[in-house]
Image: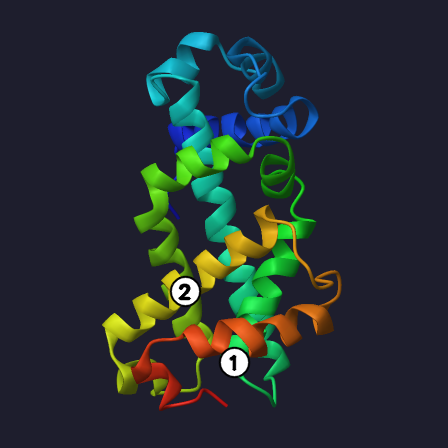
Amino acid sequence: MPAPDPATGATEAILDAAVIEFERHGFRRVALDDVARRAGVSRTTIYRRFANRDELVAAVIERENIALFADIAAEVKRAAPQSNYYVEAFTLSILKFRRHRVLHRMMQDEPALVLELAHRHYDAAITRMAEALRVIFPAGFAERIGAQAVDELADTILRYAAMVLLLPSAQPLDTADDIRAFAHQHFLPSLPAALRTVPAR
C-alpha cells in the first residue's frame, strides 16, 4: 500500500479548516491566517496551494459540490422513486443545498458571491450534476438519451434550483412536497424535448 501523500493531507486539512471558518464567519470575512492556524499549517503552505482567497473559496466549493452531488445521487438511487427521477433529483438537490452548512449560508448571506462564482465555475457544476444523474438513472437510460441531453438536464436542474434557492416565491417551497409540486408545474415543462419524450420513471 502506498504511503499517504503529505501534500494531499495538508491540502485536505486546509480545506477542512476553511469550511469551518467559512461557516463561522462567511466567505468574504475569513482571513487566511485563521485558516492556517486552524489547519495547523503556515500561511506559506496555503499560498503554495492557493494563490489567493478566491482560489481557496473555489476549491472548497468544488470539493463540497462533489460530495453533495454524490450524496444526492446515492440517496435518489437508494430510494428508487416510483415517480419521476427528474423531479426527485431536483427536489433532493434543493433540500440538500438547504441543509448544507456552508453552501446554504453563502446563498443566504452572499448571493452576489454565488452569482460571481457561478459565472466562473458553472461548467464544473454542470459536470458534477451530470455525473450524479448518470448514477441516478436506470441502467442504460443516460446512453439512450445521449450526453448532450444529460448535460442539458443538469443545466436545467441547476438553473431552476438557483431560482428556488435565491429568489422569493409566490407559492410555498418549504417541504419536499412543495418542491415536487413546483417541479411538476414549472420544471418538467421546461425540459429539453429529448427528455420530455423519454420520461425517466
Residue sticking out furthest to the front: 170
Horizontal arrangement in the rendering, residue 37 relative to residue 116 (left or right): right
Residue sitting at x 70%, y 64%: 171
Helix, strand or loop at disc 2?
helix
Instruction: Looking at the image, tell me whether mark 2 or mark 1 is earlier in sequence order.
Output: 1
Residue type beneath disc 2: Thr
Report if residue 90 is visible in the image.
Answer: yes
Determine whether label 2 and label 1 are within 8 Å by CB. no
Q: Is residue 65 above or below residue 119?
A: below
Q: Is residue 162 above or below residue 21?
A: below
Residue type beneath disc 1: Tyr
Residue tagged 1: 85
Give x and y (percent) for residue 170: 68, 59
Q: Examine the image and state in which quarter residue 111 appears.
A: top right
Residue in front for this viewpoint, 74 or 39:
74
Residue sitting at x 53%, y 54%: 163
Residue tagged 2: 156
Helix, strand or loop at disc 1?
helix
Report if residue 4 is visible in the image.
Answer: no
- Image color mode: rainbow
Residue sitting at x 39%, y 75%: 191
Give x and y (percent) for residue 180: 64, 74
Which mark identifies residue 188?
Answer: none
- Mark 1 Cα shell of 10 Å, populated few (<14), some (14-19), many (≥20): many
Horizontal arrangement in the rendering, residue 68 relative to residue 134 (left or right): right
Horizontal arrangement in the rendering, residue 8 relative to residue 67 (left or right): left
Give x and y (percent) for residue 143: 27, 83
Give x and y (percent) for residue 100: 65, 47
- Mark 2 Cα shell of 10 Å, populated few (<14), some (14-19), many (≥20): some
Q: Examine the image and state in which quarter residue 58 appears.
A: top left
Residue at mark 2 to residue at mark 1: CA–CA distance = 14 Å
Residue sitting at x 46%, y 64%: 157
